[in-house]
Image (cartoon, grey):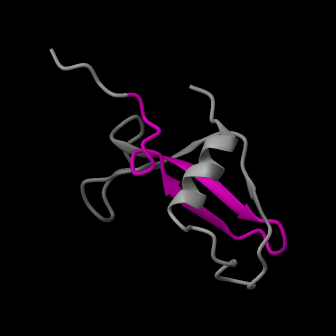
Amino acid sequence: MPLDRDQVIRLLQERNATKPCSRCGKSNFSIIDQYSTLNLQDEVGGALRIGGPNVPVALVACTNCGAITAHALGALGMLPQKEEE
């Protein structure tokens, strides 16, 4: 599914996620055009598991310093609902 940047902006604004950058204090941000994932691992120092469980995220970048914050798509209600069998 393609990332809907306008929907990400609207949902973050509805949740008051509008504070300035935590690194430089500036207030201009850009939504990165595609979503990313944070891989989940069972143990620290274990073998890196590719293709396992992950958290899909929208990435927001400060246009001044480049700091990136990740926002879980599930928490924003942007993941498709799984049909129950």
Q: Position of residue 83 (x, y in %)?
A: 25, 19
User: Is residue 45 one of those drawn in magenta?
Assistant: no
Q: Position of residue 15 (x, y in %)?
A: 50, 62
- Asked which quadrant contains residue 14, the reply is bottom right
User: Is residue 63 one of those drawn in magenta?
Assistant: yes
Q: Is residue 42 left or right of residue 73?
A: left
Q: Is residue 45 left or right of residue 68?
A: left
**27 lies above or below 39:** below
Count the numbered circles shown.
Answer: 0
**7 lies above or below 85:** below
Spot the residue most to the right: 64
Q: Nearer the viewer, residue 43 or 17?
A: 17
Spot the residue most to the front: 14
**29 lies above or below 80:** below
**24 lies above or below 68:** below
Q: Position of residue 56 (x, y in %)?
A: 47, 43
- Asked which quadrant contains residue 12, the reply is bottom right
Pick the quarter of the image with the C terminus: top left
Spot the residue most to the top: 85
Name the residue: 33% across, 41% down. 53
Q: Nearer the viewer, residue 42 or 69?
A: 69
Q: Position of residue 27 (x, y in %)?
A: 77, 74
Residues rendered magenta in the picture: 56-80
Q: Is residue 17 left or right of residue 23?
A: left
Name the residue: 62% across, 54% down. 59
Name the residue: 29% across, 25% down. 82
Name the residue: 25% across, 60% down. 43
